[in-house]
Amino acid sequence: YTITMLEETLGHMKPNMSAICEYRKKEGDYRSRVQELDIATEERDAARREHDALRSRRLTEFMEGFSIITVKLKEMYQMITLGGDAELELVDSLDPFSEGIVFSVRPPSKSWKNIQNLSGGEKTLSSLALVFALHHYKPTPLYC
């Protein structure tokens, strides 16, 4: 009796058999979009890894050059002024590209001063020492 009742109820329901076909089509679309998302995510992650590697390389190369230039600047300024001292400092040592560099000098028998607070002659000697230090790090034919 129960089977007969269920068959009769099913006959009145008139199920839409094309719904299964539609479901399979939507499921296929979903799977293809998930696959596209996975590919896009992998491409994004690869680009992010490459970007991070380039940022790390940029920082490493900058810090190497900065330390060489700082040492050479000190040597050149001492040689030009016969006893002064010069120094390059990073404003933000954690992110040297965000804030910049401070150029401080101590002319012979004077105190440490920022480059903006020097006289014209002192600025010229300081700048010349910096140009020589930069030229030592990366020679250019312009100054030969």
Image: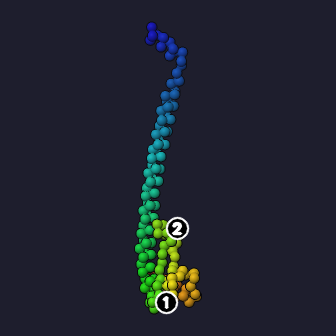
For mark 1, what is the residue? 109
Q: Is residue 143 visible?
A: no
Q: Position of residue 1 (x, y in %)?
A: 45, 8
Determine the image quadrant of residue 116: bottom right
Report, in whole angstroms, how far the alpha carbon at label 1 lies from the one at label 2.
34 Å
From the viewer's perspective, is residue 16 above or below residue 5?
below
> Identity of the amino acid at label 2?
Ser
Name the residue: 48% across, 11% down.
5
Name the residue: 47% across, 83% down.
86
Colouring: rainbow
Instruction: Say which of 143 and 127 sits in front.
Output: 127
Q: Position of residue 118 (x, y in %)?
A: 56, 85
Say whether disc 1 or disc 2 marks the residue closer to the N-terminus.
2
> Identity of the amino acid at label 1?
Ser
Instruction: Say which of 15 and 70 sits in front.
Output: 70
> What's the mark number on residue 98?
2
